[in-house]
Image (cartoon, rainbow, N blue to C red):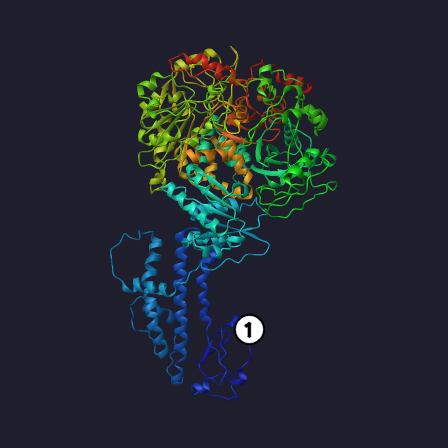
Amino acid sequence: MLVYRGAEGGAHSQAVCSSRRRKKSTGDLFQKGYRVRVGHPEKEEPEGVCHSITAAFGVVSYWGLRFLRALRLIQFSEILQFLNILKTSNSIKLVNLCSIFISTWLTAAGFIHLVENSGDPWENFQNSQALSYWECVYLLMVTMSTVGYGDVYAKTTLGRLFMVFFILGGLAMFASYVPEIIELIGNRKKYGGSYSAAMFARYVPEIAALILNRKKYGGSYNSTRGRKHIVVCGHITLESVSNFLKDFLHKDRDDVNVEIVFLHNISPNLELEALFKRHFTQVEFYQGSVLNPHDLARVKIESADACLILANKYCADPDAEDASNIMRVISIKNYHPKIRIITQMLQYHNKAHLLNIPSWNWKEGDDAICLAELKLGFIAQSCLAQGLSTMLANLFSMRSFIKIEEDTWQKYYLEGVSNEMYTEYLSSAFVGLSFPVICELCYVKLKLLLIAIEYKSDQRESSTLINPGNHVKMTEGTLGFFIASDAKEVKRALFYCKACHDDITDPKRIKKCGCKKTKNTYNGYIKSTPEPPLLQSNHLDSALDTSRGQQSVVPLVNNRKGSLLPPPRKRHMVQTEDGKRLQRAQSLPVKYRYHPSNRQFEEDQHSALSPKKKQRNGNMKNSPNSSPKIMRHDSLMIPMNEPIESMDENVKKYDSTGMFHWCPSKDIERVLLTRSEAAMTVLSGHVVVCIFGDAKSALIGVRNFVMPLRASNFHYHELKHIVFVGSLEYLKREWETLHNFPKVSILPGTPLSRADLRAVNINLCDMCVILSANQNNIDDASLQDKECILASLNIKSMLFDDSIGLLQANSQGFTPPGMDRSSPENSPVHGLVRQTSVSTGANIPIITELAKQGKQLPVISFSPDKSSGTSIQMITELVNDSNVQFLDQDDDDDPDTELYLTQPFACGTAFAVSVLDSLMSATYFNDNILTLIRTLVTGGATPELEGLLAEENALRGGYSTPQTLANRDRCRVAQLALYDGPFADLGDGGCYGDLFCKALKTYNMLCFGIYRLRDAHFNTQSQCTKRYVITNPPYSFELVPSDLIFCLMQFDHNAGQSRCSLSHSSHSSHSSKKSSSVHSIPTANRNNRNKNRDKQNSRQIS
């Protein structure tokens, strides 16, 4: 053992002379070889060999332990994971096995090399043998493989003793690791071979595992001072965690200082562990259960900023999954009642159980994201305005900007995808201005799109107002909802100063100026901050101050980047005298009407736009293309003392909240249709829902799909008839929640039967929806969507005889320009114009009109006798994102392409529940985003309504009172056609910004996107009928006549005065429905566009 290894690695078996010894520094020792100092002699000996153990400890010697460097190879796999080289489970496991095997082999060979060349100390080191290192490597290999040739063997006692123990471990390692390495390299099935009983290979590793059974993730979280942390639990898998981290740690959130602690009772697999290692600076994992108070204490739940609970979206039993998450909420709230919890729920009816938890309080930030409610709500909105589901899904997801140089549809789509939804407080420069004025100023001057504000009533009830009228004036501290590509851009709304920035043309130069004193400093965290006392100079402020006290708490709302800038003053709205006289339901998001006597715009007094901008935007008193009917379309034109709609107050037509159309409950037999009955019923402009399910399938909650289509801000004649095609056994189970909705029918059958599809006139429907309740019962992910894909391809391959419908359509003169049936103006159905009403609060109408006789419109190619199923508007629900490649046979999407980049999703024809994963992180950073999404998607669902559904699981009818009727007056989303009407002059090469300003000033319509033909930029005669979504185009974006514009409109009070019901006779519905479906702006003569624009610039808005 007394061997000196110098810098050259030479070995000397004799004792080291004192004259040749020299002291080594620590760095020198580690650089030239590991050496162990044994002792110091009291007396130096000139030469010779130590003859006893005592003498051995009386000299200074060095042990050659450089072979221990081979142990560094064990960390080789982790190094490759940190470098993001190893990603898959097989690659990580293969490198782990190889590194452990090789490092153990080389280290053991180094030990044999040491003892065999040194000898046994009790034998006076006389029994040593000269073996090279590579001979020892050879010896260890033949020993592990049980071959043992005998040509090289250990002679020392230490060497033989080591070989005895090494054989036990090395043989087991060789027998288990080598076959597994070969299996991973050869990709052979693990259980495809024959059985062989290898005791060492099976028992020894298990014994070692039991001995070393120490929890790798059993520690406790140590919080960092000045840094918040959140706890994430529930369904922790590679997919769920990667989707969550991708959005939560997105590079656009550059100021997020939050650490993520995952808690799960099962240790992560290799791929998930590698994911945690790649984000080791912000992510930690601990093994445990939230049902165990000890584990909650380990992750410091009492000091956590929030707790997020993920759900398994693909489970076979959604109710059991929701029950598990509810138990997690109960356990966490029992341990710490004040913790903020954001949980995913699969079924809408299970949200009611959360209300039974005493410490659950949505006002304090607790939120339940119901995936079924939002998923079906998104799909329902696509029935009213196709493409809106894609636009909204992209707005609350963090997407990086992808630049494309080629002039393709992907270029414009991806420019819109980079936009997200943010919130920021409005500058004091906007005080006293109305919402339309501020909205125009933000878009033209600041390059921001303001779509909504947060309003807090006198009773401290916060509500979100989407595109409110010009009767609402802003005060300091008003929170605005913006669509922008970056949170830094939204700061312009806070920093804008009229005195300093009025002459600035470049919005990037709008920075915080010195003339404004900020009362609250930026703290970098999401935290509730006490508000300052109200200003005594304002009488209304003083009154509110007396009733509410001097201080209150600001809700957790601000931009989704994770920062909070507290409002400088008390947040409230000041309304005009007429606005104060309005009666509104406290739970209503948008609820204003206005008397025309005091109607005026503040542009003349308060507009911060320069005179040149005013002239450019067309300050006209009346549009040349407008009419009295159009002006009445503005909700501000309805006098307070006039009835909205002739209605018997003793008849219940709406639910008790006034948010949805209601009818007395009906037995399912009354709505059943046979094929012959359906064929005799002239169905057109309806919604066909193809649903797969049976008596054993889990309920998907179809009520969440029907409710947005029955919102009360539609008039009764505007409601689309809904026809379900599917298994009667399944629909009977869903009918309990549907029997109070009007205009619903059921055709028992199967969506794969063409006879059933033809019976419901699927070629004449406004939208076909394909859903499945059987998706989660299949183990193979690629087969989860087989039914939906087969139904989609089946419909697209069908041919229909539409010659009669096309002749009628041409006789009416409204064949639209180069548009497919997804557009509201293209309707080859008995002379009807496809229509819905327009809604922001929840519903989506389509503004369309009839073209004049003989009017020359852009060309659209129709087959004279046959039409294909490819022209049917359709949206398909998918579980597996990769299956989107099978929906469109003519696209070139790669199977590995992310869902939002695929053509079906960009066109609004496919929707997957995975896009809702981003809502978890979006809600954490900004809980107002979820409120806005619910307002737009659900049709007006409120916490009060959820409480009623928790009591009875059905809507309750209510009498029509002024309060409930006021609930109908909420904003709606519309698709505006440009091929004709007052905006036709802008549709042919005009600027989107000019359209934005004209629509806002003239009709209080807020435009926020375009639904454009995919090949519109090619200018060819035979264009593809597919459309895609463009979100928030820039001011100078050029328009084409075939564009459909997404816009937010006020409630139309006058549309209900010309009601008519759907006729079920063969051709009698044609005339009546034609009149009722015209829900827009009258046609005007299209003169020269440049002349019209010159005239408009010379006029002013009244």
- Residue 789 spot, x, y in % from top left: 37, 33
Q: Is residue 793 above or below residue 152?
A: above
* Label 1, residues with CA under 10 Å away: few <14, some 14-19, many ≥20: few
- Residue 593 spot, x, y in % from top left: 59, 24
Q: Quadrant of residue 592?
A: top right
Q: Quadrant of residue 688?
A: top left
Q: Nearer the viewer, residue 418 or 407?
A: 418
Q: Is residue 346 above or below residue 797?
A: below
Name which residue lies at 32% across and 58% down.
179
Q: Is residue 103 above or below residue 419?
A: below
Q: Is residue 892 visible?
A: no
- Residue 131 spot, x, y in % from top left: 38, 75
- Residue 877 spot, x, y in % from top left: 41, 34
Label 1 amino acid? Thr
Q: Quadrant of the C terminus?
A: top right
Q: Nearer the viewer, residue 310 or 758?
A: 310
Q: Nearer the viewer, residue 13 or 1053?
A: 1053
The residue to which callout 1 is attached is 26
Q: Is residue 42 left or right of residue 146?
A: right
Name which residue lies at 46% across and 64% down.
72
Q: Please, what secondary structure does the residue beneath circle 1 have?
A: helix
Q: Is residue 327 visible?
A: yes
Q: Is residue 773 above or below residue 303?
A: above
Name which residue lies at 45% across and 48% down.
330
